[in-house]
Amino acid sequence: MTIGVIFSVISAIVLNAGNLTQKHAFLSMPQVSTSASLMRTVMRSRVCMLGFVLCLVGLAFQILAFAHAPIPVVQSIFNAGIVLLVIVSRLKLGERLHAIEWAGIGIVVVSLSLIAVSLAGAEGSIGLVNAWWRVLSAAIPTLLVVTVILLIIRSRRHSGGFLFGLAAGLLYGAAALGTKGASTLVARQGLWHSIPNILTSVYPYVFLAFSALGMLIYQTGLQRARISVVGTMSDVICSTYLVAIGMVVFGESLPQDPATLALRLGGFVGVLLGTVLVALGGPGKAEDMPPIESDLGLGSILVSEVDSITGHTIDSIVGS
């Protein structure tokens, strides 16, 4: 399981660095008036494409992580990696962290320690069931639930941001099932031999389809509500969905020992709570800065960090 933890750390660093790189790239882009122009500008930007490549590499390491470590462990380390990225960026700028951010960091550190203790003797808790129909049986009902949520939003003139965050988080969580599904093939067949089977399976297409839908709803929510609400709600729902639904779909068992179980679940919840506190403790200007590309429900922290570093909003760079 140690190798899974290592892959989780690498994935968290590389994937979130890729997201930040993409967002920084928009600062040097000219103003555009259409989505087509924006797409062409993005494709011509070497910095933006570098960020895209980093995201793909990070996603590959996340697949390897899921193949060697339980879902709660991988997800906790991934969330903690975002917090570390924020801390390093702030300290590099010589900025002081707010009290709520220090509280979040402390909770994350303690929670990761709890997870580390829970790893002893838990080698058999990694879910590697390869059943594409299980992924679809979870993803399709999730899509129906999201449809109902969108109908509720449409029926209201002033929809709360938490509904957009809920819908986006559910879609991002379902997308992560595709990542976990690909990891089962890697674990059974090896990295190189599994690539053709992954491409012909439903897993990458579930990831792409649900990520795209999640991005669309996430951005729409940011146009109508505060990012501190939409982003934070999306973060919480995405992580919780992946742990709760993913463990059932892939036959992943929780530790049988009550103490180990308490440590594992308490650690996951603690990391999630600490991450949210770091997101809420960032600069207030982040609420006015919607992200452009998909960041899998992690916009509340990543957008806040870019705004803190640059002092600009993406709206002022790319126009509308």
Image (cartoon, helix red, strand yellow):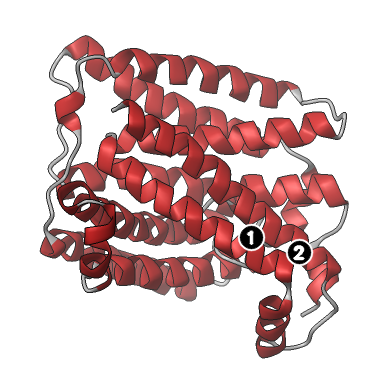
The secondary element bearing badge 2 is classed as helix
Q: Please state the horizontal and vertical placement of residue 81, each as a whole percent of the image.
A: 55, 35
Extreme-front residue of the structure? 192
| 9 with respect to 276 (left or right) | left
Q: Please state the horizontal and vertical placement of residue 83, each as a whole percent of the image.
A: 61, 33
Amino acid on which disc 2 is placed? Ala
In the rendered view, tell whether residue 34 sits above or below residue 219. Answer: below
Q: How many numbered dots are placed on residues in this image?
A: 2
The quarter of the rendered structure image containing the C terminus is bottom right
- The residue that label 1 is drawn on is 51
- The residue that label 2 is drawn on is 25
Q: Report crowding for label 1: few under 14, some 14 to 19, many 20 or more residues within 10 A (C-alpha).
A: many
Q: Quadrant of residue 204?
A: bottom left
Q: Are marks 2 and 1 in contact (CB under 8 Å)?
A: yes
- Residue at image x 46%, y 66%? 214
Q: Please state the horizontal and vertical placement of residue 19, each as a whole percent of the image.
A: 62, 55
User: How much space separates mark 2 and mark 1, taking CA atoms?
Assistant: 8 Å
In the rendered view, tell whether residue 239 sits above or below residue 203. Answer: above
The secondary element bearing badge 1 is classed as helix
The quarter of the rendered structure image containing the N terminus is top left
| 35 with respect to 32 (left or right) | left
Q: Please state the horizontal and vertical placement of residue 179, each as a whole percent of the image.
A: 33, 56
Judge whether residue 120 can be spotted in this image.
yes
**Which sits in the foreground, 60 or 96?**
60
